[in-house]
Image (tube, rainbow, N blue to C red):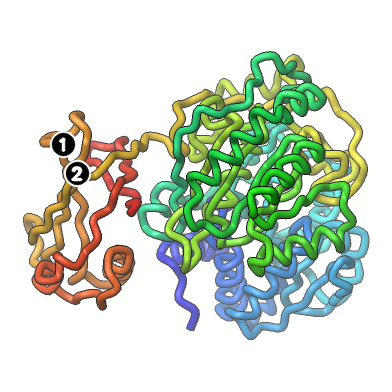
Amino acid sequence: MFELRYYQREAVDALMKYYVEDRKTNNVAIELPTGAGKSVVIAAFIDEICNRFKSSNIRVMQLTHTKELVLQNYKTFKNISNLDAGIYSAGLNKRDVNKQVTFASIQSVCNNIDKVLKHGSINIVIIDECHAVSKNSNTRYQILLNAIKKDRSTAKIIGFTATPYRLDSGLITSGPDKIFSSIIYRHDIKKMIADGYLSNIVTEVSETQIDTSKVSIRGGEYLQRELETASNDPLIYKQAVKDALEKCGDRRSWLVFCASVKHAKNVHKELEDAGICSAVVSGEMKADERDQVIKDFKEFKIKALVNVNVLTTGFDHKAVDLIICLRPTCSKGLWMQIVGRGLRIHPEKQDCLLLDYSGNNDKLGPVDCITVDEKDEKRLNSKRVLKTFRLCKQCYGESDINSITCEHCGCYLKVDRSAPKLYSKNSDSSVLSDTKTYIVKSVKYSKHLKKGSSTPTLKVTYKIDCSMFAGNEVNDFICFEHAGFAKEKAKIWWSNRTALTAPTTVDDALELQEFLDTPRMLLVDISGKYKRVISSKF
């Protein structure tokens, strides 16, 4: 039996409750951050709902916009479920029409949905990356959903996304033409990092930064020609590469984001001259050539992958432990996608180092705070507001402002100057909101028993270089004697500090404290009454 993480279980339970109790056929969404395992939640829900209501012969169609995601979701499902499942994707050369569960690309199945419906109505449609669904009635998604609803009016639509808003219309749950009525479950990035389910993103200060003060802004984004000139300054990229080499340590999977192909080639040459095996990927390359370079990177044949508007959405390589950003942007969404490439955990990865030479983090703020509030909605409805993306006229997907082809369907993009920009408040230089990094001076271990509890915990008291906390101390509590997730988290905490087998009691842990490594720095959540340790740096 496949064991779900606690938040994945909560998400599946929320979906099961919705399916059983909702009588109005409302469309709902699940919000989970990049790396949270949306494909696992999708697979577990499909398996549970179909097995629970076997007599109903429930048919499910799972949609997304790239063949890579179709295949990824299908493989995850087959690892969890024995249900009859197939693929409908021209890019994968598969066109299964009679399966109980179909994983499909929207481009392939849209005009062929009648072939699928001949074998039975669709009860549930699940859309991965559901922010790609436009409210425009002439889009592929809308045409397909209307066809499914016409065949079965009670069909339920469920969406999954890390960013529940569109840059052309705001929240996916707002407005008269909204696709989804509500978000029934969401989980927080900081909490997932603290729980050990996402990798921590750490930063180091550098004096090297691209100067965008003289770069014009058109359509809500930097003018490409001027941005390339500012970014492709040899004094900047040469110093940035030198600085990165000094700070990278033994990190082995680097992603480098550049402003143009010319800029990327220059950065690539600088890396190669320094003895770093690297390669460039861009939209100008042939698909098979680009796929081979990415494959080599994932197999660690290439250390640094230098890219231009390619490796943002849909790119999954858990081992990425260094992000070098030389690509300034005004788009907070794009910035979140860039940082998100380093959020996934990997057995040989302690954290992901973000070296931001673009100034994005200072300008755009914490990636866990991207949202749309009431003021944003008003701005999104204003014709005077400009955009930070290009809207595809074929699939109505949103792509980077400088993209030549659609990131969703591959069509050539024409500039659309009417779509609005998503505004958000700037913040400080922390990658995560309300967090600070502190140097650890010393650490002390003791046995702690919470009032009213009979189960002790290991109290870890860090002495830090900060006067804002009482006694310059931050406490953490490690639950060796608890059950379930708390105990598993304690084992992870222990393995990060010693190679010894994790103890089962607090007393045993105290006897072995001399063998524990002391962290050099702590990332602390300072938002609540009690300060919480998110991660440690050794």
Inspect the image, locate mark 2, and give the three-letter code of the amino acid beneath it: Lys
| Camera-side residue of 511 and 491 | 511
Q: Which residue is mark 2?
A: 441
Inspect the image, locate mark 1, and give the three-letter code of the amino acid beneath it: Asn
14 in relation to 404, above or below: below
Find residue 330 and report its horizontal and vertical position in percent.
Answer: 66, 27
Q: Residue at x 62, y 54 (%)?
A: 160
Q: Are marks 2 and 1 in contact (CB under 8 Å)?
A: yes
**Quadrant position of residue 222:** top right
Q: Which mark is residue 262?
A: none
Find residue 384 and report its horizontal and vertical position in percent.
Answer: 74, 14
Q: Which mark is residue 472?
A: 1
Q: Nearer the viewer, mark 2 or mark 1?
A: 2
Q: Mark 2 or 1 closer to N-term?
A: 2
Judged from the image, the secondary structure of the residue bearing numbered disc 2 is: strand
Find residue 90 and report its horizontal and vertical position in percent.
Answer: 89, 67
| Camera-side residue of 415 and 469 | 469
Q: Residue at x 47, y 26 (%)?
A: 427
Judged from the image, the secondary structure of the residue bearing numbered disc 1 is: helix
